[in-house]
Amino acid sequence: MSGKLYVVGTPIGNLEDMTLRGIKTLKSVDFICAEDTRVTAKLLNSFDIKKPMISYHEHNTAQAGEAIISRILTGESCAAVTDAGMPCISDPGEDLVKKCYANGIEVCVVPGPTAAMSAVAISGLSTKRFSFEGFLSTSNKNRREHLESASKLEHTLIFYEAPHKLVYTLEDMLGYFGDRKISLCRELTKVHEEVIRTTLSKALEYYKSVTPKGEFVLIVEGAKNTDEPLTIQDAISEAKKLVDNGMRLAEACKAVAKWTPFSKSELYSKLLEEQNG
């Protein structure tokens, strides 16, 4: 008879957020598969848990995944954890869950903290409807397609971002979304937890002068549903914000043209007219 896979949530920063059920589960399974065994070892040591671990990450999903499935099929139980938060969300654990179902293995969830839900709860933006967009691709083509698609959604958007990519991402969001409200949630549950509620243009201006630190969850206001048509002056104002934040005039017009009914050339001509007085 096969064993089970337990998907176990772990703290996103504060060890006191580890649940009693999570500790009990990690103590009871035969082995643990972890994104980074060094990180998970610190967690296990904190709660005096001594279990063998298997490294399971994006670079070894095929080989390690088969080994894990094989052990579970022989009757062993396994707990899947990530470095922080809920496994299997923007995480290679997603593939492991699929493999388990394909092999008739039962999967049980032991819920715990998640950065996305924690951030949206304190964002100050609408929580009636939202979508988790995860990390933007490093591929320019995929990144553009993702942002263009997301720009049309009227509900709140949730993104993850690393500090060294934050300014680049804010620039892209301002270009594709316009100057929307945003809550930037940094280092949630940790000593330096911070939530900045502002607009995309102001956030970009701030982080161009202040070096971003820590992992970010970005909660972005959805597209406005309004019966009032967008005027060309509205579009020009958005393009000016991009130019004020360092974008070239032609690029700013191209960015704004993507989410407004006005063409790049039309906006460019109007802006040149205004500049030339």
Image (cartoon, rainbow, N blue to C red):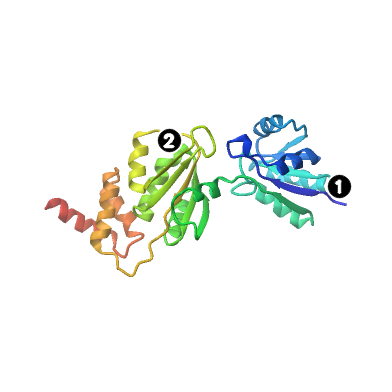
Q: Secondary structure at mark 2?
A: loop
Q: Quadrant of residue 26?
A: top right
**Category of crowding for the residue at label 2, using alpha-carbon neighbours closer than 10 angstroms: few (below 14), some (14–19), many (at least 20):** some
Tell me: 171 left or right of 100.
left
The residue at which mark 2 appears reads as: 212
Could you tell me which residue is drawn at 70 percent across and 50 percent down?
A: 109
Could you tell me which residue is drawn at 73 percent across and 53 percent down?
A: 99
The residue at which mark 1 appears reads as: 74
The alpha-carbon separation of the residues under discs 1 and 2 comes to 47 Å
Question: Which residue in the rendered view is the most extreme toward the bottom?
Answer: 227
Report the amino acid beneath label 2.
Answer: Pro
Image: 77 above or below 155: above
Residue 44 on image: x %, y %: 71, 33
Residue 274 on image: x %, y %: 16, 54
Report the amino acid beneath label 1.
Answer: Thr
Residue 136 in view (yes/no):
no
**Category of crowding for the residue at label 1, using alpha-carbon neighbours closer than 10 angstroms: few (below 14), some (14–19), many (at least 20):** few
Q: Are marks 1 and 2 in contact (CB under 8 Å)?
A: no
Nearer the observer, 146 or 200: 200
Q: Quadrant of residue 112?
A: top right
Question: Which residue in the rendered view is the most extreme toward the left?
Answer: 277
Nearer the observer, 19 or 80: 19
Q: Secondary structure at mark 1?
A: loop
Question: Which residue in the rendered view is the most extreme toward the right?
Answer: 1
Could you tell me which residue is drawn at 28 percent across and 53 percent down?
A: 239
Which of the two discs, 1 and 2, sits closer to the camera? 2
The count of marks equals: 2
Q: Upstream in the sequence, badge 1 or badge 2?
A: 1
Residue 179 marker? none
